[in-house]
Image (tube, grey):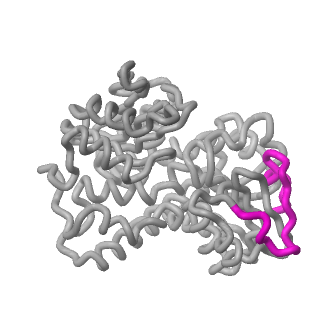
Amino acid sequence: MTDTLVQSTKLMDGGAADPLLATEITSPADELKGWVVVDSLADGMAMGGTRMTESVTEAEVKGLARAMTTKLSLAGLPIGGAKAGIRAVPDRRDGVLRAFGRSVAPLLHGGVYLGCDLGTTHADRDLFFTEAGYDVLRDTRIPRLPTDWATFWKPLVDITGFGVSVGTLAAVDSRADGASCRVAIQGFGTVGRAVAKSLESHGHRVVAVADILGTVHAPQGLPVADLLAVTDSAGTIDRRRLPDSVSVHDEPEAWLDVDADVLVLAASGDAVRADNVERVRAGIVVEGGNLCCTPEAKAVMAARGIALVPDVVANVGGAGVTGCVLTGTVPFDLPLKQMVNWLFDWVEDRVRRNSREVLEVAAGGSDDPVADLLAHRGKAGW
């Protein structure tokens, strides 16, 4: 834990430090082009997801790996941060993933765990793991799970969305009035859907949801159960099956103009930028995805008094569970159901505490509340 925390604090203090390893992965015959970045190590181990999009860049992967270091440090996990990125090639997906697996095999076997991220699934991960001859459950550094990996993850599928919901509720609870909130959600994939269900169950109104086609909006509140019923697995809402009370907006970024108290960002990076941050109307913004707001946008929101729960605090569920397994933090002697409950409790505790503390530091006038919180914890020997 200490090595990771020191590295993370150094990185957040000015942001000039280089990662420990940044390497390009290529195989022209397979049309593979990608990058692996190891930002920090703790006890010789690091972890992070594998992003696969047509536009991913080395700079993006470096930023994601650095955020992973910070995220794991805030969660108190003794493992470093890493990330991988693969340029997606239409019609060559499996071949590219296999070539990636062969290329990163030494890193996987050497302690750098690369899981799933935007654009990759557990099946994709299994494909490149198989090509690399790597099985996480046979790693001698990792205590043995009481079941196979797929069975273990099935009840944890919504854990990231659960954590984002906890962070959102912590921010809402920090308000003086404690009234019910109007919530807008940008992105309706696994995370966005889990957030919508959770916030509605706590008495808040989901008034707008944005997917790849645009924004659906109902000031009185969207019927979440009905909305989920007409949404496919990719998070796209069937407009033809929406009730008449719901309005549809095709304009790009129409979700920015919704009159809401809370804005949850659960889609692509750089959703809020210098050129559109003035359109944000919510008093609370939660980064449910990775790098949703640019540094310039964060500065503007802070100056306007908008409370921000950053991605390194809210978006910790999936990474936290994997980190708990890789570091042996989870009690492996528990039956599976109790182990799953323990992990949900662990994520809830970490996200709630970090959300409250980072908001308190920000309210105290900090220009970089995450860095200041990490520095304080480092000095305190946390």
* Residue found 20% across the figure and 65% down from its top: 145
- When asked about the image quadrant of residue 303, the answer is top right
Q: Residue furthest front?
A: 91
Q: Position of residue 71 (x, y in %)?
A: 44, 48
203 horizontally vs 157: left or right: right
The residue that appears at 26% across and 61% down in the rendered structure is 329
Which quadrant holds residue 173? Answer: bottom right
The residue range painted magenta reads 237-262
378 above or below 55?
Answer: below
Q: Is residue 194 above or below residue 366?
A: below
Residue 8 forms part of the magenta stretch: no
**Pick the front one: 115 or 283:** 115
Give percent across and percent down for residue 253.
Answer: 79, 47
Q: Nearer the viewer, residue 344 or 185?
A: 185
| Residue 357 as seen in the image, left or right of residue 222 | left
Camera sees residue 38: yes
Identify which residue is drawn at 70% across, 34% down: 296
Could you say which is closer to the camera, residue 2 or residue 27? 27
Asked whether the viewer can see residue 376, the reply is: no
Residue 256 counted in the magenta span: yes
Query: Could you tell me how many numbered marks the image carries?
Result: 0
The residue furthest left is 140
Residue ID at (76%, 35%): 274
Residue 302 location in percent, x, y? 71, 45
Could you say where residue 161 lies in the image, as x and y percent from the top left? 53, 63
